[in-house]
Structures are given as C-alpha cells and as structure tokens.
Amino acid sequence: MKALVFDDALRFDPRRPEPAAADGDTLIRVHQAGVCSTDLEITRGYMSYRGILGHEFVGTVVDSPDAALVGQRVCGEINCPCGRCDLCRSGLSNHCRERTVLGILNHDGAFADHVRLPATNLHVLPAGVDDDRAVFVEPLAAAFQITRQLRLDSKTWVTVLGDGRLGLLVAQVLRNAGCPVRMIGKHAEKMALCEKWQIRSRGLNDIAPRHDQDVVVDCTGSAAGFELAMRLVRPRGTIVLKSTVAQGIPLNLAPLVIDEVTVLGSRCGPFGEAIRALADDAVDVLSLVHKRMKLEQGVEAMELAGRPGVMKVILTM
Amino acid sequence: MKALVFDDALRFDPRRPEPAAADGDTLIRVHQAGVCSTDLEITRGYMSYRGILGHEFVGTVVDSPDAALVGQRVCGEINCPCGRCDLCRSGLSNHCRERTVLGILNHDGAFADHVRLPATNLHVLPAGVDDDRAVFVEPLAAAFQITRQLRLDSKTWVTVLGDGRLGLLVAQVLRNAGCPVRMIGKHAEKMALCEKWQIRSRGLNDIAPRHDQDVVVDCTGSAAGFELAMRLVRPRGTIVLKSTVAQGIPLNLAPLVIDEVTVLGSRCGPFGEAIRALADDAVDVLSLVHKRMKLEQGVEAMELAGRPGVMKVILTM
C-alpha cells in the first residue's frame, strides 16, 4: 500500500506492506488524515519514532472482529492500552505503561491506505460530521480535555497563547465553556478568524503581561511561550501545557514557586464530546483547512504544514 | 547596629543605621536567625535584592503600636502586603503585587541587631518553642504549605527529592500527614537522620525511576532535581516545586504533557501550624542545627551554609 514513512528521513513509500493483523484489531481504509504539529516534531526527533506517521484520520472499516463495525465510517482514539498494567487497572489506560500510540509510539499511523486499531478505539461518525470535519475529532478532543481537568466558568479569564491549529480549537472550546477568552497570536488571518468567532485576540507584540490571567493555555509549542505564560498568569493561577516540543530550552522555573502557579500537562481527550460539538456545529473547523493534498505529495505537505501561519493540511488517500 | 548586608558583595557592616520606623511597624531585637538557601541564591543574583539579608528569625519586641506585643518573644511572617491591591482584596495577600518581603524584596532582613515588621506579621511564641526551634518556624511553615495545597492520605506515595534543610522538614511534615514518604538524598548523615525518624531513604544513585510516585516534592534547588522528578512521578501525579534557583537551565517539558503531570509551585505557609508542631515536638528541628556563629562571622557562616551537606547554620546577634 501507499504510506508516508519517517525512517531517519521522511519519504513516500508506494509499496509499504499492509499492517499485519493483530489480535482483535480492526482494519480501516483511510479516507483522509490531518497533519499535526506532533508529526512535524517527530521528524525533528520527538519520541524517536520510526514508522508510518499520522494519527488524525477518518476512514471506513474493512474488517473487524466486531461485525457491526464493518462498513461504518469511523475515527479512532490513538492510545492502544495493554489493559493489564497498574495504570490500566486504575482507570488511566490513556497512560498505559505498555501502550502503543498511533503514528507516535510503536504503532504504524494513518498516513497510508490502511491502518489497524483495536475495535474499542473506534467511534462511528454521524452523517453530520463529514470527512473534512472528522479529521479534526482527535485534536478537538485534546482541546476538550482542558474542560475535564479544570473548573471553568464565566469568571475564569483565559488567555490562549499561540494561534496555531490547536490554539484555535482550544479558544473555541473554552469560549463555548463560557469563559472570557483572549487569543494571543502572530498572524492577521488567524486574528480575523477569531473576530469572526467573536473571540477577542491580540498580537503578540501588543500585549503587556500583567500577571492577571486565571488560566493561560500554552499552545505555542515553543519555550518562549511557556516563559510568556509565566508572565501572564496571576499568582495561584494555572498554566495548561498543551503542546510538546522535542528540544529542551533554558527555563527558570522560579516564577512558578514565587507565584504558586499550577502547571497542568494536558494531552488526549474525550472523542465523544468532540464528535458532538462537530455534529452540533458548535466549533468551526472547516475554516482551519489550509490545503488538501494527495498522500503521494506527503513530503511536500509536511513541509507546507511546518511553515509559519499555515493551518491544517489534509492528506487524501 | 550590626548587620550582614548584600550589596554587590556580601559584607558585615558594624555601623548600619537602625531600620527607619514605618507606619504601624514593630521594632524587634533579633536573638538569632537561620541561614536559608534563598539567602545563598540572593548572593548569586536571585531577586536582584540589595540590603540586609535574613528572614528566619526569633526576637523580642522592643517597640510596637500594639502595646501588648512589647516584651514578647516572636517570630514573623515575611510578606508585607499593601492591603489594597486586587490580590490582597481576594485573600491572596501573600502574593500582594506591592508587597515587600523580609530580606528578599525591598525590605531589610533579620541578619541584624534589629528588624522592623508590621505587628500583624508577628506570632508570639509559646515557652515550649525555644529560640533554636523558633528559627525553624518560617521554613517549617513553608513545608506545611504543601498540606494546604494537596489532598494527602495514607495512600499517597510521596518521594521527597533533596536531603537539604527544607527537604528534611518536608519529609517529616508529610510523614506526620500520614503519607508513606521516601526521601532521596546524597548524604549518609541525612539518611541516618531519616532512619532515626523512621522515614525511608535512598541514595540518589540507588534509585531506578519508575514513574510510580503519586507526589514528588522537589527540594533540590537544582534543575537536575526537576528532571528526576519528571521521571519519578506517575502519570497524572503531582510534582511540588519548593525551591527556587537563580539560573535557568535547559529543560524539556514534554514529559509533563505526555504524562499529564500537575506541577504545583509552593512557597510560604501557615506559621500557626508550624509553631504548634514545634510546641508538640512533632517535628525534630534541633538535629538540623549544624553550627551557631556570631553575626560578625556572617560572611564565613554563609560560605559554610553553602557547602554540600551542611544543614542549618544559625547566626546569633
């Protein structure tokens, strides 16, 4: 089959073997998949991953031990837990010690004609969530995770740092949660989107950090973002850390102690809520689509997705 | 008066002017004061502080607008809030935007014959808390702060990283809170103390981090400590950051996101609980006294306190 592989270098492989059947796994024919910053970080060394990239996908079930799934249009959760370790047994299977993670850790990803996942990872998509929306379920679920970790209401002043793909989803989800949200970014066209969504936005160079935000969500994927977050958040406030970067950078954490700040790492989230929000048109994802490209152009597509200001690049199979 | 001053360099000043009276401030004759790692960090540039050092003290009230205080033996909280800013009005006066901090921020400290503090900062000491114990009230209160920030019980597995002055207080407080506590340190004599206190301890080189601790309290004051904490804490666990360092070091925060770890900055704590614990002999602080030295030997005393393995150095006036 065709696949986009990272294996020391990024390359399109026109004759990759189909994923081998694993006990209980379901085979899905991929329709399309989104390029995520994590994919870009992997090509810079993150997670030392080697294999087929891609974890934001929509497809049709071709074969499954769960007969009811066959022929259904699905998206899939990316963590494949063992079900037996202490974390799985304590309800933290997303953090399973033996897990594989689609396109990120010991599990071939979805930038390919076919992908395998356990049937329990799959979510059948309602007709209202078309393929273009469906590739956003995974990152949108990650945005919803914040609402599970933090008590948020109309008195919670939130700043979202970073107007990238994830930041623009997070801003919408927290606005819907009733918070006064401000987005801080760099790109005029993203600011225009915020205006369309009635979310306040400011340019990175137009702000004077005043240690007065209840919650700062760092979606910048840069060390500078975390430092700015420490200057924006109020004493006893919360910084939510959403994006991962491969490189360590010099950081002085003393402000966290002095201001008794809480930092909350936040990763994957609830697919059900994300699908519902898309079905209800409560979150605009279509405005985030920058370009659709064929899988054969995958190397080019990844290069494009890495350029400043470029939003979601979708690979079609 | 005599004072130990940091003013580009650390020096003993035999003729420092007495602290000027400020509205509502109480004048205290200092008996003795403890050297803290924060004092050492200040001499390395932390907080850009210039003035008399010292914030862990015990003394006798000489003069006060509160007549009942005169002649009383007291210790004192170090944050002097404005009482008017948004944070003071919301009950976060320890984080007051206009605060001064004894010996740390725009407020001459207690390594001197006399010190001034607002009467409301002072706590009268019961007879059971003698002067040697009393200099530990401030750091012990900082250790108690953790019990206010986190729910802790007999099922909370805690590792305290760093067998320095603060770490040894934190380990005792969390042991008293009912947690299974393990101390990780470097020095045989500190391990022996832990054994005496029936707190488990391990050498830094004898551990295999397994991402299995519910709570890791970083009292190392080093960047390496925070990195080790990220490898010790379980997914969805908590790292409590107690110590501040002046220097930033390269840090990769991706593990916080991947494991959805909570980092909790923790600073000053409840003096009342610390005084009660000392009065009840619930925490052993006398074993932490390394040496008592005259204020005149302050420069030497600070140098001594900075050597690896040295515990509390007390300055007597």
Image (cartoon, coloured by chain):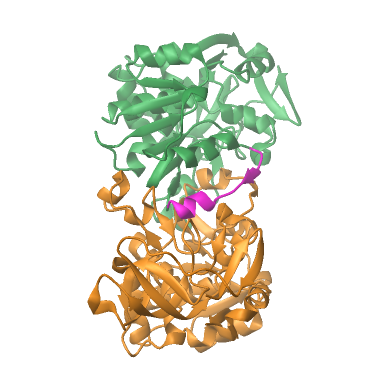
Chain colours: A orange, B green
Q: Quadrant of residue B147?
A: top left
Q: Kindly identify the residue that appears in the image at 43 percent across and 74 percent down.
A: A140
Compared to residue A191, the image places residue B275 above or below, namely above
Compared to residue B76, the image places residue A35 above or below, namely below
Q: Kindly identify the residue that appears in the image at 40 percent across and 88 percent down.
A: A130
Q: Percent x, y for residue A148?
A: 33, 63
Q: Percent x, y for residue B19?
A: 61, 29
- Give the residue at the far right of this rendering: B8
| Closer-to-camera residue (B259/B52) | B259
Residue B28 in sight:
no
Residue B2 in sight:
yes
Q: Is residue B250 left or right of residue A135?
A: right
Start-end of magenta stretch: B246-259
Compared to residue A61, the image places residue B212 above or below, namely above
Q: How many marks on residues?
A: 0
| Closer-to-camera residue (A184/A123) | A123
Compared to residue B203, the image places residue B82 above or below, namely below
Q: Percent x, y for residue B31?
A: 51, 15
Q: In which quarter of the image is residue A178?
A: bottom left
Quadrant of the snapshot with the N terminus of chain B? top right
